[in-house]
Amino acid sequence: MKKLVIITGIIVYILFAVSAFIAIASEEKAAASQVASVTESEVQFAALEESYIVKTEKGLIVVADSNKEVLWKTDTLISMLPKEDQKKLKKGIVAKSRDELRSILEDFCS
């Protein structure tokens, strides 16, 4: 009986250690992908032109050029925003400069 309790304890300990290791590895992978996506986003942002439309597409906030071609997608769900902001985004918000675009995105995406 003692051997069964000891073996069960060892198995539980091993399972706990493995699950902790997997959780740490997953967090590190998620953090690495966040850093990669920020870097990619910064590159995409730098390539933008001077006239933008901030709007919604498939429930997310996106940035489009003056031809309404999507240049950049955010991870921000419009369903998380107040109804008034959702209405504005559905109509589209025009940004006439990168600074204005950055300000609009900070308001909605932070």
Image (tube, rainbow, N blue to C red):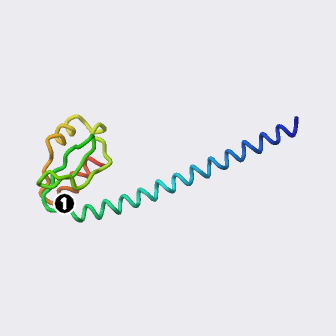
Q: Secondary structure at mark 1?
A: helix
From the viewer's perspective, is residue 8 above or below residue 103?
above
- Horizontal relation, residue 41 to residue 20: left or right: left
Depth order, front residue of 105/32: 32
- Horizontal relation, residue 80 to residue 64: left or right: right
Depth order, front residue of 77/84: 77
Residue tagged by mark 1? 99
Q: Residue at x 14, y 61 (%)?
A: 50
| Residue 11 sits in quarter | top right
| Residue 15 sits in quarter | top right
Please state, as top left, top right, bottom left or bottom right, where the N terminus lies in the image: top right
Q: Residue at x 30, y 62 (%)?
A: 42
Q: Position of residue 72 (x, y in %)?
A: 25, 54
Q: Residue at x 19, y 55 (%)?
A: 101
Q: Position of residue 48 (x, y in %)?
A: 20, 62
Number of numbered discs on residues: 1
Q: Name the kind of residue labelled 1 in the image.
A: Asp
Q: Residue at x 30, y 42 (%)?
A: 77
- Horizontal relation, residue 81 to residue 25: left or right: left
| Residue 8 sits in quarter | top right
Q: Position of residue 47 (x, y in %)?
A: 22, 65
Q: Position of residue 58 (x, y in %)?
A: 26, 41
- Horizontal relation, residue 51 to residue 62: left or right: left
Q: Residues within 10 Å of mark 1 (few under 14, many from 20)?
A: few
